[in-house]
């Protein structure tokens, strides 16, 4: 697979406060930011690598930690050397957890703290593209074995987090990867429906493991946000939500001023910001559906999940 792009340059975050690049693959806020805003914060928690270790002085006003890495995957090999894999993110959580345990005074207050925390995860797209043979020169294969392997790794990750005290999981499934501008512009765009079937297969398996974990693990609570279904509904009638373009990227190419790429002026009209990621508007609408809506979440929305006893 080709090298992962970066969002540490303009035009990324052009509509973010001060228009300074933040590493977000968007023109502004993303879904994590809007969920944080719904919880009363200004934006999503700061990145793990930018934070000092939790200490008595930093615990006041502590809002959480962001371990995410754009373009990362479930597999360690997905965009390796360019991202922080899901496994590495969990390892970082382990370090934070150990420090919090010392600060909070032991296992019991730590578990109480973690049981009230929301663990938000959205991963898998970058694993699925090569799994489904995007970028490769031969037709789509039967991806059942590879999807099963990814799902088993996902299951192990969630089980490990639960074992460390996490109880509330907000899980965002995979969208319509066959509709990504990067796919539509490629010479393999004829297999876009195959890519969407691959995503649907992954999502069905994800729903199964979440249901099973809720049965097996003590107080394992979750909200599964159906980004696939939400995207499909939006694309079927884009004008209903004010979109005029759901096919191409607002910011083309590398989305960089230094490469003389073009950024659209009517960003509210576009679903896609770049070749892979959505605009701030798309993220805001998706968050509204996932946080307090009913149609695209199961078994509960994120707001109800947070209100549950951990």
Image (cartoon, rainbow, N blue to C red):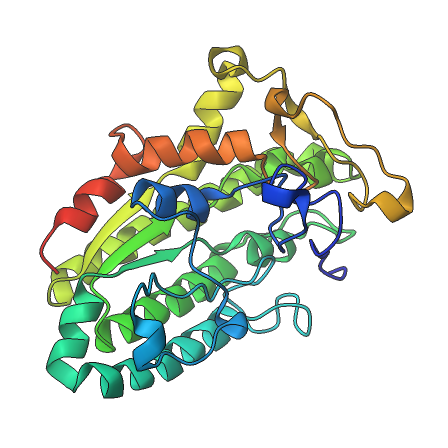
x and y, in percent, of residue 42 in the image: 41, 47
Q: How many marks?
A: 0
Residue at position x 52%, y 45% from top? Answer: 198
Viewer can see residue 199: yes
Quadrant where the C terminus lies?
Answer: bottom left
Whether residue 156 is situated above or below residue 137 in the rendered picture? below
Nearer to me, 207 or 66: 66
Q: Quadrant of residue 262?
A: top right
Give the position of the N terminus as an image quadrant.
bottom right
x and y, in percent, of residue 146 in the image? 51, 62
For residue 113, side relative to residue 169 (left or right): left
Residue 290 position within the rendered picture, expressed as x and y whole percent measured from the top left: 33, 37
Residue 149: x and y in percent read 45, 66
- In the depicted structure, whether residue 297 falls above or below residue 43: above
In this rendered view, identify the residue nearer to me: 144 or 20.
20
Pick the residue in front: 58 or 67: 58
On the question of residue 299 being in view, the answer is: no
Q: Could you tell whether 186 is left or right of 285 in the image?
A: right
């Amino acid at each position: 697979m080709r090298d992962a792009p970066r969002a540490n340059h303009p035009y990324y975050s052009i509509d973010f406060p001060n228009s300074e690049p933040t590493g977000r693959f968007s023109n502004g806020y993303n879904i994590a930011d809007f969920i944080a805003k719904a919880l009363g914060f200004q934006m999503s928690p700061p990145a793990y690598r930018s934070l000092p270790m939790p200490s008595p002085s930093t615990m006041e006003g502590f809002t959480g930690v962001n371990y995410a890495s754009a373009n990362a995957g479930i597999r360690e090999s997905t965009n390796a050397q360019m991202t922080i894999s899901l496994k590495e993110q969990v390892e970082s959580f382990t370090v934070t957890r150990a420090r919090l345990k010392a600060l909070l005074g032991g296992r019991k207050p730590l578990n109480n703290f973690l049981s009230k925390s929301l663990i938000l995860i959205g991963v898998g797209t970058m694993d699925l593209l090569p799994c489904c043979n995007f970028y490769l020169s031969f037709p789509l294969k039967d991806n059942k074995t590879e999807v099963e392997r990814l799902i088993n790794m996902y299951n192990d990750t969630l089980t490990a987090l639960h074992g460390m005290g996490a109880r509330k999981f907000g899980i965002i499934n995979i969208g319509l990867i066959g509709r990504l501008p990067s796919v539509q512009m490629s010479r393999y765009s004829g297999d876009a429906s195959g890519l969407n079937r691959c995503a649907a297969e992954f999502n069905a398996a994800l729903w199964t493991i979440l249901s099973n974990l809720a049965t097996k693990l003590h107080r394992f609570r979750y909200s599964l946000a159906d980004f696939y279904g939400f995207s499909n509904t939006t694309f079927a009638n884009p004008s209903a939500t004010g979109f005029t373009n759901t096919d191409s990227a607002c910011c083309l190419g590398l989305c960089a001023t230094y490469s003389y790429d073009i950024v659209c002026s009517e960003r509210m009209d576009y679903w896609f910001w770049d070749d892979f990621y959505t605009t701030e508007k798309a993220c805001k609408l998706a968050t509204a559906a996932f946080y307090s809506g009913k149609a695209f979440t199961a078994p509960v929305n994120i707001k109800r999940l947070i209100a549950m006893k951990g």
